[in-house]
Amino acid sequence: MKDIFKALNDDTRREILELLKKEDLTAGEIAENFSISKPSISHHLDILQRADLISGEKKGQFIHYSINTTILNDVFTWLLTLKK
């Protein structure tokens, strides 16, 4: 769970999740929405993947990224258990 919160503790990564909430995208398509380098986007995608918040599926020569809602549901459920 530590990796999940680390991944979510960054504005860029949260914005990437917002984009992927709408549709699956390639790294290039994601990068078009930011003013940072493609290697920086790849770094953020790697952190999100290691936290299992997103997954990538190779289609042709591109990897299409999608949000992993199962993990987000698990985190949300856990957070609700903390509520008094």
Image: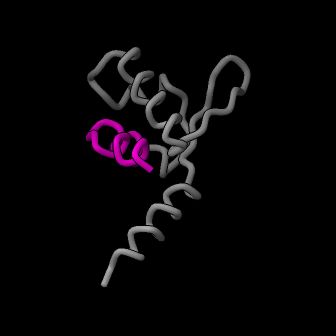
Question: Which picture quadrant has residue 81?
Answer: bottom left
Decide which of 14, 35 is in the foreground and name it.
14
Up/down of 32 relative to 65, above or below? above
Q: Quadrant of the C terminus?
A: bottom left
Question: Which picture quadrant has residue 41?
Answer: top left
In the rendered structure, the answer to whether residue 71 lies left or right of residue 13 reads: right
Q: Position of residue 48 (x, y in %)?
A: 46, 37
In the rendered structure, the answer to whether residue 63 lies left or right of residue 53 reads: right
Decide which of 74, 30 is in the foreground and name it.
74
Q: Which residues are magenta?
A: 1-18
**Residue at figure coordinates x 35%, y 74% from the top left:** 82
**Residue at figure coordinates x 35%, y 31% from the top left:** 33
Q: Position of residue 10 (x, y in %)?
A: 28, 39
**Residue at figure coordinates x 48%, y 44% from the top left:** 20
Q: Position of residue 78 (x, y in %)?
A: 45, 68
- Main SS, magenta residues: helix
Decide which of 65, 32 is in the foreground and name it.
65
Up/down of 58 relative to 17, above or below? above
- The colour mode here is one colour
In the rendered structure, the answer to whether residue 14 lies left or right of residue 74 reads: left
Up/down of 75 relative to 2, above or below? below
Q: Position of residue 63 (x, y in %)?
A: 62, 26
